[in-house]
């Protein structure tokens, strides 16, 4: 049982830590450094680089969600049943679903829109429909990635408390 709890906690640390590292360190650093170096099309390059990092991290998220759910189910089957099993399993499912929606649906729409635009969306006029659509998709992506972040912190707390 210790090994399953350890695997679940390690999975949460990787998932939550990765989200924090990407959102708080990687993205701002990419955009700031490339802008400071005055590289032509720096926002497009930063967006492309971060988009690829995020695409790869989504794969990590899918694996983490599956592993987390697997450890919960195994612990329930092998006993003793984890406290608040239903809440934990439901939360892990919601976290995985938000990650999948972000990675498979929203990221695809963002990539399509960026390809149609051909320039950094921020270079378009404020009222441009494409810029507005990109902004909404970006906000949706951010909100969806907050779900596993907050949910993961809750699950870490419950795991440590148990």
Image (tube, rainbow, N blue to C red):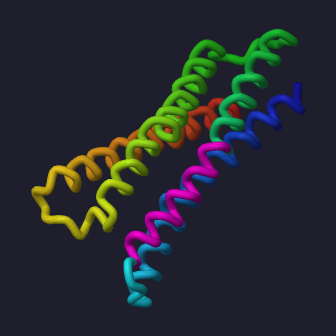
Relative height, residue 113 to residue 2 (above, below): below
Side of 149 relative to 158 (left or right): left
Q: Position of residue 78 (x, y in %)?
A: 87, 12
Relative height, residue 53 to residue 16 (above, below): below
Residue 14 forms part of the magenta stretch:
no
Q: Residue at x 47, y 39 (%)?
A: 102
Q: Position of residue 123 (x, y in %)?
A: 23, 70
Q: Residue at x 44, y 90 (%)?
A: 37
- Classify residue 108 by image quadrant: top left
Q: Position of residue 153 (x, y in %)?
A: 57, 40
* Residue in front for this viewpoint, 14 or 59: 59
Q: Which residues are magenta?
A: 42-59
Q: Residue at x 71, y 36 (%)?
A: 63
| Quadrant position of the C terminus in the picture | top right
Q: Position of residue 77 (x, y in %)?
A: 82, 9
Side of 38 relative to 81 (left or right): left
- Classify residue 4 by image quadrant: top right
Residue 53 forms part of the magenta stretch:
yes
How many numbered discs sit on the rendered protein?
0
Side of 77 relative to 104 (left or right): right
Q: Residue at x 65, y 43 (%)?
A: 59
* Residue in front for this viewpoint, 146 or 51: 51
Looking at this rendering, what residue extends furthest in the bottom direction?
A: 37
């Amino acid at each position: 049982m210790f090994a399953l709890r350890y695997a679940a906690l390690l999975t949460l640390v990787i998932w939550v830590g990765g989200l924090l590292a990407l959102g708080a360190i990687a993205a701002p650093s990419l955009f700031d450094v490339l802008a400071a170096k005055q590289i032509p099309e720096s926002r497009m390059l930063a967006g492309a680089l971060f988009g690829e990092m995020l695409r790869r991290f989504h794969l990590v998220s899918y694996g983490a969600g599956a592993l987390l759910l697997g450890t919960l189910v195994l612990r329930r089957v092998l006993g003793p049943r984890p406290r608040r099993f239903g809440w934990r399993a439901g939360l892990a499912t919601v976290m995985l679903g938000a990650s999948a929606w972000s990675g498979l649906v929203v990221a695809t729409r963002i990539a399509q829109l960026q390809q149609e635009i051909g320039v950094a969306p921020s270079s378009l006029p404020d009222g441009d429909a494409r810029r507005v659509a990109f902004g909404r998709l970006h906000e949706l992506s951010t909100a969806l990635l907050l779900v596993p972040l907050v949910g993961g912190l809750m699950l870490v707390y419950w795991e440590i408390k148990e």
